[in-house]
Image: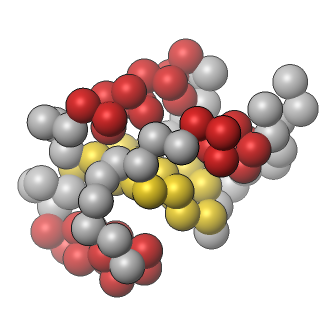
Protein backbone atom coordinates (compact mmCIF):
# COMPACT_ATOMS: atom_id res chain seq x y z
CA UNK A 1 0.00 0.00 0.00
CA UNK A 2 1.28 3.42 -0.95
CA UNK A 3 -0.89 5.59 1.26
CA UNK A 4 -0.69 9.32 0.57
CA UNK A 5 -0.27 11.84 3.37
CA UNK A 6 -3.93 12.66 3.97
CA UNK A 7 -4.66 15.58 6.28
CA UNK A 8 -8.39 15.06 6.80
CA UNK A 9 -11.23 12.79 5.80
CA UNK A 10 -14.82 13.76 6.51
CA UNK A 11 -17.84 11.62 5.69
CA UNK A 12 -21.26 13.24 5.42
CA UNK A 13 -23.98 10.67 5.95
CA UNK A 14 -27.39 9.86 7.35
CA UNK A 15 -28.34 6.86 9.51
CA UNK A 16 -30.85 5.56 6.93
CA UNK A 17 -28.54 5.73 3.90
CA UNK A 18 -27.32 2.24 2.90
CA UNK A 19 -24.42 3.57 0.78
CA UNK A 20 -23.29 5.69 3.73
CA UNK A 21 -22.98 2.49 5.76
CA UNK A 22 -21.05 0.80 2.94
CA UNK A 23 -18.64 3.76 2.67
CA UNK A 24 -17.97 3.95 6.41
CA UNK A 25 -17.49 0.18 6.67
CA UNK A 26 -15.06 0.29 3.73
CA UNK A 27 -12.96 3.04 5.33
CA UNK A 28 -12.92 1.17 8.66
CA UNK A 29 -11.80 -2.05 6.92
CA UNK A 30 -8.95 -0.07 5.33
CA UNK A 31 -8.11 1.33 8.80
CA UNK A 32 -8.72 4.88 7.59
CA UNK A 33 -9.66 7.37 10.32
CA UNK A 34 -12.46 9.74 9.42
CA UNK A 35 -14.80 12.26 10.96
CA UNK A 36 -18.47 11.34 10.42
CA UNK A 37 -21.10 14.07 10.26
CA UNK A 38 -24.76 13.04 10.40
CA UNK A 39 -26.38 15.69 8.20
CA UNK A 40 -29.87 14.55 9.23
CA UNK A 41 -29.25 16.01 12.70
CA UNK A 42 -26.70 18.73 11.91
CA UNK A 43 -28.35 21.32 9.65
CA UNK A 44 -25.39 23.71 9.77
CA UNK A 45 -23.00 21.04 8.47
CA UNK A 46 -25.61 19.96 5.91
CA UNK A 47 -25.78 23.52 4.58
CA UNK A 48 -21.97 23.75 4.43
CA UNK A 49 -21.86 20.41 2.60
CA UNK A 50 -24.30 21.62 -0.06
CA UNK A 51 -22.59 24.99 -0.36
CA UNK A 52 -19.14 23.47 -0.89
CA UNK A 53 -20.06 20.46 -3.04
CA UNK A 54 -23.15 21.76 -4.80
CA UNK A 55 -24.76 18.40 -4.00
CA UNK A 56 -27.40 17.39 -1.46
CA UNK A 57 -26.80 13.66 -1.86
CA UNK A 58 -25.03 11.46 0.65
CA UNK A 59 -22.72 9.83 1.19
CA UNK A 60 -20.09 12.40 0.52
CA UNK A 61 -16.49 11.92 1.50
CA UNK A 62 -14.14 14.86 1.55
CA UNK A 63 -10.53 13.76 1.33
CA UNK A 64 -8.54 16.90 2.01
CA UNK A 65 -10.00 19.28 -0.62
CA UNK A 66 -11.32 16.52 -2.90
CA UNK A 67 -15.04 15.80 -2.80
CA UNK A 68 -16.47 12.41 -3.77
CA UNK A 69 -20.25 12.12 -3.93
CA UNK A 70 -21.53 8.58 -3.56
CA UNK A 71 -19.48 5.45 -3.01
CA UNK A 72 -17.04 5.77 -5.91
CA UNK A 73 -14.55 3.14 -4.74
CA UNK A 74 -12.02 3.65 -7.52
CA UNK A 75 -11.88 7.43 -6.98
CA UNK A 76 -11.68 7.01 -3.20
CA UNK A 77 -8.87 4.44 -3.57
CA UNK A 78 -7.02 6.75 -5.95
CA UNK A 79 -7.26 9.70 -3.55
CA UNK A 80 -6.13 7.51 -0.63
CA UNK A 81 -3.22 6.09 -2.61
CA UNK A 82 -4.44 2.49 -2.84
Q: Residue furthest right?
A: 2
Q: Nearer the viewer, residue 66 or 55?
A: 55
Task: Please report the residue visible at 63 percent of the width from the left and 43 percent of the height from the top.
Answer: 76
Can residue 72 be seen here? yes
Is residue 15 or residue 57 the one in the foreground? 57
Residue at 46 percent across and 41 percent down: it is 71
Specify whether residue 37 is in view: no
Residue 29, x across and y down, in percent: 55, 16
How many tags in the picture? 0
Looking at the rendering, in which quadrant would you find the C terminus? top right
Where residue 4 appears, x then y in whole percent? 83, 44
Residue depicted at x 44% and y 56%:
69
Give the image location of residue 43, x and y in percent.
Answer: 14, 68
The location of residue 77, given as percent across then percent down, is: 69, 38
Extreme residue toward the top, this view: 29
Q: Is residue 80 left or right of residue 67?
A: right
Q: Is residue 37 above or below residue 44?
A: above
Taking the image as shown, residue 1 lies to the left or right of residue 56, namely right
Give the position of the N terminus as an image quadrant: top right
Q: Is residue 1 above or below residue 56?
A: above
Amino acid sequence: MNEKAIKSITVFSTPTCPWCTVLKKYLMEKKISFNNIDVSSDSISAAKMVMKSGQMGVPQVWIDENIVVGFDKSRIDSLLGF
